[in-house]
Image: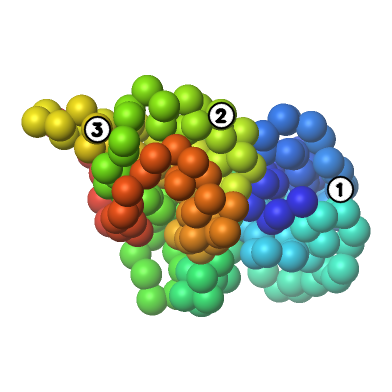
Amino acid sequence: MKHTNIVLLGAKRSVLAFNKATGERLWSARLSSSAMSDDFVSVIADETKVYAHSGGKMHCLDLFSGQMLWQDGLSGYGHGVASLAIPGLEQSGLPPIHACQAASGRRGCGQHHRVRQANSSPRLHCMQYVLIIHEVADYAAWKRVFDGAAAMRKTAGERSYQVLKFDTDPNRVVHFSAWTSTADARAFFESPRLIQIRIEAGVKAPEFIYLDQLEAGSL
């Protein structure tokens, strides 16, 4: 399983991992913490490891099995809520998966804390997008192939999509989609299998634009 297909939950002094697509629980791990501490868990992950803080202790677990790799009692740093960051995570081309939100701070606090990566502003996970402009021989034929590849697209990392058309040409189609990472999107769209599928769907000279989200809002 790819690391981008895993979602993590920190709760009640435990970390749980789920299959993002099916909701299947993959593993759960109980964290050691002081009896004086509350149940809150801060958690973040890279492509192979999970890092979690609970009750004044830091833990490192294997992302795919939940096996405890190491822990540190953090003597002298108390038992409060902690924030976590992995410097260089995005710069390495890895999506900032499972970026931890200290969603409620201490009980009743109601504050939201965002993860800060090194040299960046505090923020939530920013999506990556792909905009593809197709000229297709026949829209209905292309759409059948497009719909038939839905499961394949989801497994590869596509999270949502829109299909649009030029107002002057029904066979000039735009596929706009959100992805777990641009690396996943490139690997999928530039694979030999997808090149063949586009040929079978009657796509002519597609234009690919890979995008990182800077900001989102509504007016």
Q: Quadrant of residue 175?
A: top left
Compared with 6, 92 (above or below) is: below
- Image location of residue 112, percent across then percent down: 45, 43
Measured Cα–Cα span from mark 1 to mark 2? 38 Å
Q: Closer to us: mark 1 or mark 2?
A: 2
Q: Position of residue 124 (x, y in %)?
A: 43, 51
Q: Residue at x 31, y 54 (%)?
A: 205
Q: Is residue 189 above or below residue 22?
A: below
On the image, numbered disc 2 is attached to which residue?
148
Q: Going 37% across and 44% down the picture, which residue do you hit?
A: 203
Amino acid at pointer 3: Asn
Q: Nearer the viewer, residue 198 or 47?
A: 198
| Residue 122 falls in image quadrant | bottom left
Q: Which residue is mark 3?
A: 171
Q: Is residue 148 left or right of residue 182?
A: right
> Pointers 1 and 2 in contact (CB under 8 A)?
no
Q: Amino acid at mark 2?
A: Gly
Q: Earlier in the sequence, mark 2 or mark 3?
A: 2
Instruction: Give the mark nearest the N terminus, 1 or 2.
Output: 1
Q: Which amino acid type is marked by label 1?
A: Ala
Residue bearing the label numbered 1: 29
Q: Secondary structure at mark 2?
A: helix
Towards the viewer: 157 or 173: 173
Distance, label 1 to label 3, CA atoms, is 52 Å
Is residue 60 visible in the rendered image? The answer is yes
Secondary element at tag 1: strand
**Tag nearer the camera, 1 or 3:** 3
What crowding class fits label 3: few (fewer than 14 Cα within 10 Å), some (14-19), or many (20 or more)? some
Q: What residue is at 81 percent from the left and 35 percent from the top?
A: 25
Q: Are there few (<14), some (14-19), or many (20+) residues within 10 Å of tag 2?
A: few
Viewer can see residue 176: no
SS of the residue under disc 3 = strand
